Image: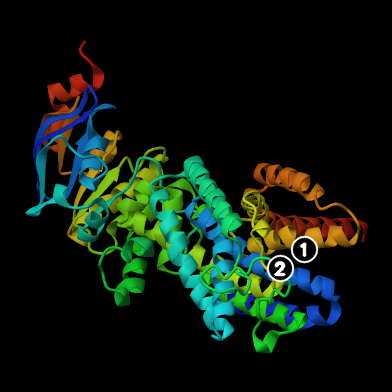
Amino acid sequence: MRADRTQLIRWGVVAALVLFVLFGFPAFLSLYYVDAMTQVAIYSMVALALGILVGRVGLVSLGQVAVLAIGAWVAARLLFATTQPYPLVLLEAGLITMVAGTLIGLPALRLRGLYLALITLMLAGAITVVLATVNFPNGGHGFLGYNGGLIHIPPIRRPSVAAGDPAYFRYSVIVAVLMFLLVLAHIRTRPGRAWAAIRQSEPAALAAGINTWLYKLWAFALASFITGVAGGVLAGAVHYLYSIGFPTQDSITLLAVVLMGGAYSLWGAVVAALLYQFLPALLNNWGVSADWLIILFGLGVVQVLTTAPAGLADQVPRDLARLGRLLMRLRGDTG
Amino acid sequence: MIEVTGLTVRYGGVTSLDDLSLTFEQGTCGLIGPNGAGKTTFFNVLSGFVRPAGGTVRAFGVDLLSMAHFRRARWGVRRTFQTEQAIEELSVFDNVAMVHEHSGAGASARRRDVLDAISFTGLDAGPDTKVRTLGMGQRRLVEVARAVVGRPRLVLLDEPAAGLPDEETRHLGEVITRIPEHTGALAILVDHDMSLVSACCQTTAVLDFGKLIASGPTAAVLRDDDVIRAYLGVA
């Protein structure tokens, strides 16, 4: 009974927070920060997907930004070539990326740890090279849809209900919330339990009757789907996509911020996205070079791995509670 | 009934099980032997982690070795490991439910079956408790609950009492003794604690260097000269 109540309160707080983000942020924040928060919403999905692989199943992938590029590519192509409604395009981008990501994951499933990380990094590199060679579709004809050096390059369209930046921000947040709910539905049920078993010990999972191969593939498929959808939202957010926007090394930075945020927690994905997209926007506004962040992230990963393996999403509330108790005690002493 | 015939396992030049033939009839059976005797290897063959070089294992008339390892759980093989393997991030309920949902038992009975298995072990922690907050003895009971849920036919317990204090070992022993009547399964217990084996097992088989050196009623086996020699060495 009490557990139900706590659960209800927790959901209430989350709902209030989402509503505040949806309506409060566009009202209070400048357009510059609204755009930055749109990126946060998008990358929270990417971090969420990487968190499933790294945190839930224990598969280290260094190719997530390349998967994001596939999603963005497919969405951009569909948005130029068809008049399909935007949600349908997002779904298709997710599904096609899911197939591509799963095919990439298929041979990699026999590997673990460092070798899996290396393979995914190389595949990401390969995809980046392909993208740099053939370019992103920008409204031209054919599958590649590249119209060379034309001056009037059409922007990637947005949904009619979310043409402006604040409206598109809300749209991105709603898509992200849906993806978080999708993951929650997974981790609270059969696949989540199977992933937890695999992460703890593969022999024990096999002995419990879990088809570990299938469930690892499932994790790859789900992560690719979510990243594909995020790519679709990204396409509309930035209007123009270039292969240079998806460098291979970003996958490494992404893994670093996911570890810092907390790969095992859903909130960790939000923290990771804030570190990855909001912090650079903030520094940029203050006139500080965002290159400092690379150093900061490096130190951050060391900090998190040595003092808080569950990431900032776990550490900060715990430390705040500790600070609260300390302050209460101090007040008790003086009062 | 488990009938093992001519089972041989080799790791490179080492013969871990050497033409082993033995039968486990029913109830809780002990399997003992000095370190390196081949007990865990035998369990690994039954769970499908090790492919034997030769021999057959018939479990209740079924050729166990021809089954894929993850399918054996659905058929009814359950096991615990020497190192405790309860999943820390999950609750007690989810730990047990995880086995139930891959056992082929119906989803409609899941909640009842899982709670029944937990209460069977006498675990003094609620089903919603996270395993990471439990002590070693309680975690071992979670493992036993996982082993008895969802119609098991063969329960393999690999040193379930390792590192437990006497009081907890005694409770675990009582639970293990009741596994066959509660589930109808055949249980095989590997342990170095002879008082636990004596308390739980009507019959016991002894391995040494991959060979069967004695089997029969537990009390008689533990008095057998060959067994004493294998454990203590030749004077």
Gap in angstroms between the C-alphas marked 2 and 1: 8 Å
Residue A1 in sight from this viewpoint: no
Residue A39, disc: 2
Q: Which badge, 2 or 1, comes first in the chain's sequence?
A: 2
Q: Residue at x 64, y 62 (%)?
A: A269
Residue B210 in sight from this viewpoint: yes
| Residue B72, percent from left and from top | 22, 55
Q: Nearer the viewer, mark 2 or mark 1?
A: 2
Q: Decide: is B125 above or below A16.
A: above
Choose between B166 and A294: the one closer to the eye. A294
Q: Decide: is A163 above or below B56.
A: below
| Picture mark count | 2
Residue A278, disc: 1
Q: Is residue B103 left or right of residue A293?
A: left
Considering the image in quadrants, where does the C terminus of chain B appear?
A: top left
Choose between A321 and A73: the one closer to the eye. A73
| Image quadrant in which you'd find residue B210 | top left
Residue with the most extreme right position: A334
Q: Chain of mark 1?
A: A
Secondary structure type for disc 2 = helix
| Residue A90, percent from left and from top | 55, 77
| Residue A250, percent from left and from top | 66, 52
| Image quadrant in which you'd find residue B106 | bottom left
Amino acid type at image mark 2: Gln
Secondary structure type for disc 1 = helix
Q: Residue at x 11, y 34 (%)?
A: B215
Q: Is residue A247 left or right of residue B52?
A: right
Residue A151, disc: none
Packing grade of label 2 (10 A; few <14, some 14-19, many >=20) is many
Q: Residue at x 19, y 19 (%)?
A: B229
Choose between B150 and B193: the one closer to the eye. B150
Q: Are marks 2 and 1 in contact (CB under 8 Å)?
A: yes
